[in-house]
Image (tube, grey):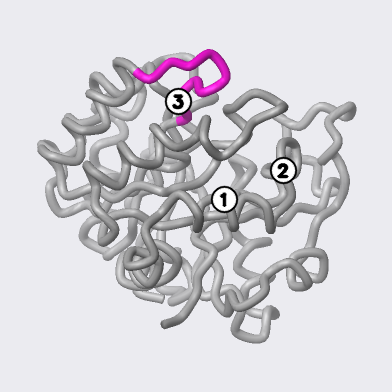
Amino acid sequence: MKRVDAHHHVWTLSRGDYHWMSPDLPIARDYGLSDLRPLLGDITATVLVQAAATEAETAFLLDVARKSAGLVRGVVGWTDLASPRASARIAELAADPLLKGLRPMLQDIDDTDWILQPAVQPALAAMARRGLRFDALIKPRHLPLIGELAERHPDLPVVIDHAAKPDIAHGSFQPWADHMARLARETPWYCKLSGLVTEARPDWQGDGLRPYVEQLLATFGPDRLMWGSDWPVVTLASDYRRWRETAATLLPTETHDAVFGGTATRFYSL
């Protein structure tokens, strides 16, 4: 079974559009595929995800993917979904077979229900028509309302990034757990098992993540759950190998083929 990292980034700081990255962050340096390849082990396919809310980022990631010798099988890019030209732009982007989806950076938008505003709905409908996926970069504050997207756009494939970033550091399990269970039950959406260690305490251990992983597995099941490294952001709290091995330990062996490869391959049509 193919092993897939369903969520990672690369960036070149001189491009100048990573506005969220303060210079004092340990990850405030360039990261490329040459840094990632030695860490992958048996992983042979990856999904490269945007980290800047610009069209230039999408072009940059597609160029990286084209030059990756088959490693990057899909790109999740960005375009302005609220633009009057969004539907036309989505049609243009979808013509590239490496472009698998789009991701507005909802976690950085103050308006919690921004994605539900009327101006964005034509773009979401265009994504569904063109076969693109929607990566939902959300936080717990979005969970009570984000499910409305499934009602408005039932044909839009959605994956929740980083399990909606539960506040593991403070032991906040509810109401996150109930909201995620409801979304798993009432929508056909998927979820990424990624980003958990950077939401935990600096001295995190696997047992502290266990309730969250078990909740995701029990509600979404292995066929709607996909592992991602969130590299290089993960290095703020762990190294690549430790997070992957921790996830493998917390998941039953019989789920590994799906969570570590099959689900992402199917969802993104890699």
Considering only vertical position in the picture, is 163 above or below 159? above
Amino acid at dot 1: Thr
Direction from residue 7 to residue 257 in the image, left or right: left
Q: Residue at x 74, y 50 (%)?
A: 239
Amino acid at dot 2: Ser
Label 1: which residue?
A: 246
Q: Reading the chain from its start, which is encountered first: label 2 or label 3?
A: 3
Between tags 2 and 3, which lies in front?
2
Amino acid at dot 3: Pro
CA gap, disc 2 to disc 3?
A: 17 Å
**Magenta residues (range):** 165-173
Q: How dense is the environment of label 1, judged by Cα within 10 Å: few (below 14), some, or many (20 and up)?
A: some
Quadrant assignment for the C terminus: bottom left
User: Mark number for residue 166?
Assistant: 3
User: Mark number for residue 212?
Assistant: none
Q: Reading the chain from its start, which is encountered first: label 1 or label 3?
A: 3
Direction from residue 187 to residue 175 in the image, left or right: right
